[in-house]
Amino acid sequence: MTTLPDAQEIERFRALIAIHLGLQIDDAHLDGLTHLLRARCALRGSVERYFDSFADEAWLQSELPFLARELTVTETYFFRNTNQFAAFSTLVLPRVLAARGNACRILSAGCSSGEEPYSLAIAAYEHFPEVADCIEVTAFDINPLALEKAAQGRYSNWSLRDTPKSIRGRWFSADGSDYVLDARVRQAVNFTAGNLVRDDRMLRQQGHFDIVFCRNVLMYFCPKQARAAVDRITRALAPGGYLFLGHAETLRGLSNDYHLCHTHDTFYYRRNAELHDAMIADEQSGTRSRPAPAISNDTSWVDVIQRASERICALAEGVASSDVHDLTPLDLGSALECVRGERYAEALRRIADLPTEHADDADVLLLKAVSLSHSGALEQAESVCHALLARDGLNTGAQYILAVCREAAGDVSGAIEHDQAACYLDPGFAMPRLHLGLLARRQGDGVTAVRELSQAAHLLQHEDPSRVLLFGGGFKREALVAMCRAHCDAMGGQI
């Protein structure tokens, strides 16, 4: 009888899964992971032999798909998140077809049992029947059983639960309790085995795809592998191409290579076209260039400043020693202290005194936008925010400041859109939730107001002090929570 693996062996197994499949297995699933490891080790004779086998590339070709089948969630359905398919069909696909001469290459990465790529093919036939045969849909997944089901094109009523009756009637035929997909749609999708975590041949084709759907995949990855996977997708995506993620997934913290798009009440991304030449040069030279790291809201402001200084020091390493004295270290501490003391005019003066070579640093732009908005120079604050978003389209702070500025300008819909973008990019950011709640109350929407204010009050309990300082409008954490409660109480709600 094979004994259960010990804690160290389980941790090693968990690390190997992260390396080869990208999956981040949390502690709640350790029992299942333990029994899976026990079963696999029994086949190899011992834990040591099983772990040693991971160095055998030929063995991995069969073992990884098996592990993926056991560890991944394959539940999906046709036209999942219909708003994204609306954006795809009525805006994204028409733009690509117009730019590419009625041709388009689409990739469904992590396609599971085929519902997503088939939905894309159906949408192409529905909206552009005259050129549908020129629209290529490629789909890959690591799970062989899921791919087998996809190839059959046979689905239960549950898989079609969000499919309009008209589409179901045109593209499916009943066969007992199942529904069989039309042969034209099945032939329109090319399925293949692939692993998003490894340097798969499908993603080595520079700029090959115009549109990529990779939904509800990255959410299961550990951060390092998620970033690597996004890098591979970016390499394979054409300049100006579109990327769709799951509704609970964002590129925040994973890539600075995209602009955020918001239409049809959904979010998706467009690759920055200007990075294409740099990436081509990187491929040819064997190097890799990227813009300077944009500000991240999941660390303290002190850490952000420290990273900025480290970046300047790193740049200095590549300069001849005789030139180093020309580089002045970036110090935002004094400007931040002015913001802390609500001396915004002085903060702006200190920012203006910074070396000109740092004027467009993301760190500097955000602090400048905050200071301008607090001092009432809203048009200037908006201009700085747009400059920041041109550099980092996923900057949550810039989105929130724009929301405040848009409200002051009387553009409530614009304010809501920027707040929603900030919430999407960072679900833990309290201030856009609070702002949405106040806007909803002013519009007489009590249900939305109570929901957003309640969520804001909860998030404020855990909000980073630096964000309360920067975006709280001079209010302390306790005062902001009390504000949420007071407005909820006035509308008959409770927190």
Image (spheres, grey):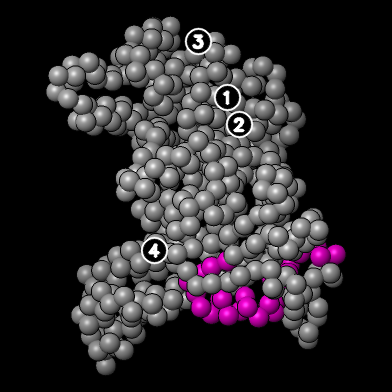
Query: Going 70% across and 49% down the picture, which residue do you hit?
Result: 101
Query: Going 39% across and 42% down the picture, which residue do you hit?
Result: 281
Mark 4 or mark 1: whose residue is earlier in sequence: 4
Q: Can residue 449 be seen in this snapshot? A: yes
Q: Please provide percent x and percent y for residue 256.
A: 45, 39
Alpha-carbon span between mark 4 and mark 3: 50 Å
* Type of amino acid at the residue the image marks with label 1: Leu
Check disc 1 and report the residue beneath it.
Answer: 402
What label sits on residue 156 in the rendered view?
A: none
Mark 3 or mark 1: whose residue is earlier in sequence: 3
Alpha-carbon span between mark 1 and mark 2: 6 Å
* Type of amino acid at the residue the image marks with label 4: Arg
Q: Nearer the viewer, residue 124 or 65?
A: 124
**Residue 329 to residue 32: above or below:** above
Check disc 3 and report the residue beneath it.
Answer: 375
Query: Going 61% across and 70% down the picture, which residue do you hit?
Result: 190
Alpha-carbon span between mark 4 and mark 1: 39 Å
Check disc 2 and report the residue beneath it.
Answer: 418
Q: Magenta stretch: residue 134 in it?
A: no
- Density class for disc 4 (Cα within 10 Å; few <14, some 14-19, many ≥20) is some
**Residue 98 to residue 75: above or below:** above
Alpha-carbon span between mark 4 and mark 2: 36 Å
Q: Nearer the viewer, residue 46 or 203?
A: 203
- Density class for disc 1 (Cα within 10 Å; few <14, some 14-19, many ≥20) is many
Check disc 4 and report the residue beneath it.
Answer: 198
**Residue 405 to residue 271: above or below:** above
Which of discs 3 and 2 lies nearer the camera? The answer is 2
